[in-house]
Amino acid sequence: MADKALDLDFVRSFFPALNDSWAFMENAGGSLVPHTVIDRVKDYMTECQVQPGGNSAIARDAQGRMKKGYETVAAMINAEADEVVIGPSTTRNVITLAAALRDSMKGGEVIVTNLDHEANNGHWRRLEEFGITVREWSVNPETAELEPEALRAMLSDKTRLVCFSHCSNITGGPNPVAKIAAMVHEAGGFVCVDGVAFAPHASVDVKALDVDFYLFSLYKTYGPHLSVLYGKRELLLDARGQYFYFHGEDNLPLKMNPGAPNHELTAGCVGIGEYFEALAAHHLEEPANNLHGRMRQMFEIIARHEESLSARFLEFAAKHPKIHLIGRATPDHDSRAPTFSFVIEGVKSQDVPPLLEARGIAANAGDFYAPRVLEAVGIDSADGAIRCSFVHYNTVDEVDRLIGALKTIADG
């Protein structure tokens, strides 16, 4: 028997914030949280809000709950628990990583893009202050996309690191990560991939992608306000520790997490796995034998639903003469995420969110911490673009509600 189509009533029953009053359309800025995560955080703070460790039963319980959080996050991306750092934000994790790798990159080159969110961008550029050459792999201004062959021409024996996104948080377009990683590895360099805009929509397998470092935000993948840095174990061991001196260089992942992880929120990460386990039990006829496999199966079902939402929005956007979309005009899940940035001719982008709010639609406008790509395609980053982003708990009715509102605004 075939797996079920996505049961939206079942899905939405997990999210206390969902109701008919609001249509949440800025999920790329942060997703809603299922009650499984909320319950895990609440239970930790209620039952074992102590210093985790081995000095008492309650402290061992706290430590065990945090350990399960690490194991859950690692399983989500097919990594080992000591290969993931759970930090406060992707920006903070990049700052830490850049400092940890700085000495090893002296005399070499780092390549960044003008497509990426500034998290995987600005702090790498600052390495110029330490004598490291920084070069920019620029998007094609006609398509707002990175072209792998343009990168190939930039690679040399001086290349130490190439930093790029798995998927743009502006255009929604994914990059061929495995292909790019292989190209960089052949030149002797490493890759650091920002998966923040990709991970809410598809399964991530860091081993299959053969990435050296991978980042994503748990608060955009239905979890607490935390972020994940994955690194290949041997690279994390070689990196210079960024915590207190008495934490040894082999103390993974703590050496890469100054200040240590947030206790209750790390324990809450178990709830992300529980949510996907519940989806799998409800939808799958023949579930895989591990969490990563079951999440991959569920994301295949999720993809079909998100494609239907994308197709509906893109049909409207393509036909309306005043709406100008940035990125690919295809609903195909392999070709774009359901994150849509656009401008409306004759309307300031900053004026649109309040008009949508009046209709019970939560969306946003701005540069979304990626002003470089907006400027590359000729959009004033001060006014920015309007962004509407869907995830699997959104409905066709909500997309129709958005379309109706945008039509009214664009038609004046």
Image (cartoon, grey):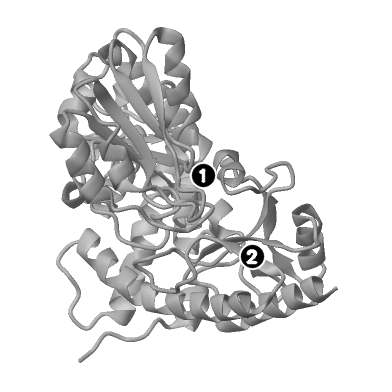
Q: How crowded is mark 2: few (under 14 residues within 10 Å), some or many (20 or more)?
A: some
Which residue is at the front of the view, 65 or 375? 375
Left or right: 111 in relation to 367: left
Marks 1 and 2: in contact by CB < 8 Å? Answer: no
The residue sitting at 72% across, 80% down in the picture is 404
Q: Considering the numbered disc 1 on the image, is that residue within a helix, a strand or a loop? A: loop
Residue 210 lies in quadrant? top left
State whether residue 283 is above or below residue 343: below
Q: In which quarter of the image is the C terminus?
A: bottom right
How many callouts does the rendering have? 2
Q: In this view, does 21 lie above or below 135?
A: below
Q: What number is the disc on residue 324? A: 2
Residue 267 in the image, given as x and y percentages of width and height: 39, 44
Circle 1 crowding by C-alpha within 10 Å: few under 14, some 14–19, many from 20: many
Q: Residue 225 carries which label?
A: 1
Is residue 371 or residue 157 the one in the foreground? 157
Asked whether the viewer can see residue 68, the reply is no
SS class, disc 2: strand
Q: Nearer the viewer, mark 2 or mark 1?
A: 2
Q: Is residue 328 left or right of residue 213?
A: right
Badge 1 amino acid: His
Q: Is residue 373 above or below residue 307?
A: above
Please state, as top left, top right, bottom left or bottom right, where the N terminus lies in the image: bottom left
Identify the residue shown where x is 62% and y is 83%: 397
Amino acid marked by disc 2: His
Q: Percent from the top left, x then y, of residue 52?
A: 37, 30
